[in-house]
Image (spheres, rainbow, N blue to C red):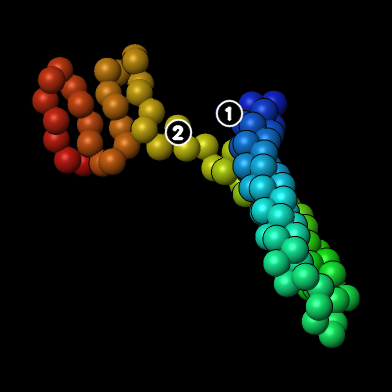
Amino acid sequence: MNKRLHTRLALIIIGIAAGIVLISTISVILTTHYHFSLYQAQAGMTHELPELNYHLEQALMQTINWTCIVAIVLAVFLGFYVAKTNFGTSHSYDASRGTHDGRGMEYESGHSRER
């Protein structure tokens, strides 16, 4: 595979992985904030440390954001790695000889034999 095809494949893999990570991160952030709002409404803010709720929510948001960033960086490295590994080359077909090599088999005129 040529370098441009590797790059395109890597960008597609990275884009899909990053999109999934971003959608799930936004979903977790919104639901976390919603549940903290519900808790504050139900608790009535009558306990002694109301700033503890705010601090805990901010800590969770920061953890979620760092997890998102690390997951996207991991997706970038894995995307380029997967694009470089040439998945299609281990099972190549040679039309001039009528053979299909890969998996240790050779096919000629309808017969198969082990190498």
The vertical placement of 94 against 51, above or below, is above
- Residue found at x 67% / y 28%: 8
Q: Nearer the viewer, residue 83 or 102?
A: 83
- Residue found at x 70% / y 60%: 38
Judge whether residue 66 can be spotted in this image.
no
Q: Where is residue 21 shown, x and y percent of the image?
A: 66, 47
Callout 1 secondary element: loop
Residue 1 disc label: 1
User: Label 1 vs label 2: CA separation?
Assistant: 9 Å
6 relative position to 51: left or right: left
Callout 2 secondary element: helix
Q: Disc 1, disc 2: CB below 8 Å?
A: yes
Residue positioned most to the bottom: 48
Of the residues shown, which amino acid type is indicated by label 1? Met
Say which quarter of the image contains residue 45: bottom right
Q: Nearer the viewer, residue 25 or 36?
A: 36
The vertical placement of 32 against 57, above or below, is above
